[in-house]
Amino acid sequence: MIHFQLVSLTGTKYDDEAYEVLVPARGGTVAIFEDHMPLISAAHPGVLSVRKKADDPDSELENFAINGGVVHVDGKTVRFIADDITTPDELSEQEAAAALKRAEELVRSAGSQTALEEAQHLLRHSSAKLHVARLKKRHHR
């Protein structure tokens, strides 16, 4: 087991033992287990997932929508720090879908390269929020 801390500007979202932490990165998802090599890396907007026990199925993963952030691993502890981390309880599928539509419109109407990059970042984060909301709905049936 590895100790995992998930911290945002609004407080600690998770602080407990975990078997596996899945962090979205630019090149794909990084799976972090106990005794992982030391690492400091930027995360990509997306879904961060925590598997509490080795035999937990994917349907038991605890999922969080993140808007980027920084992950620090020392082999025994994983710390993830970000400005914006959204838990499933903070999301509704309807609101997340509306936010995604607004982000898609911002991408279409971006008037500069900077505006386009910001809109694409917002689009990835909005997509992650909708995905977490849908996972929550699927797991609570």
Image (cartoon, grey):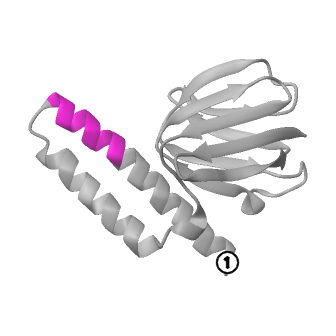
**On the picture, is 2 further left or further right than 110?**
right
What secondary structure predominates along the stretch shown in magenta?
Answer: helix
Residue ID at (33%, 62%): 99
Residue on which disc 1 sits: 140
Q: Residue at x 50, y 68 (%)?
A: 91
Can residue 32 be seen in the rendering of this structure?
A: no
The picture places residue 50, in percent across and down from the top left corner, at 73, 49
Density class for disc 1 (Cα within 10 Å; few <14, some 14-19, many ≥20) is: few
In magenta segment, residue 19:
no
Residue 85 visible in image: yes
Where is residue 70, by image quadrant? top right
Q: Is residue 53 above or below residue 93?
A: above
**Circle 1: residue type:** His
Mark 1 falls on what kind of element? Answer: loop
Farthest-out residue, left:
111
Of 134 and 68, nearer the camera is 68
- Classify residue 34 by image quadrant: top right
Image: magenta residue range: 113-122
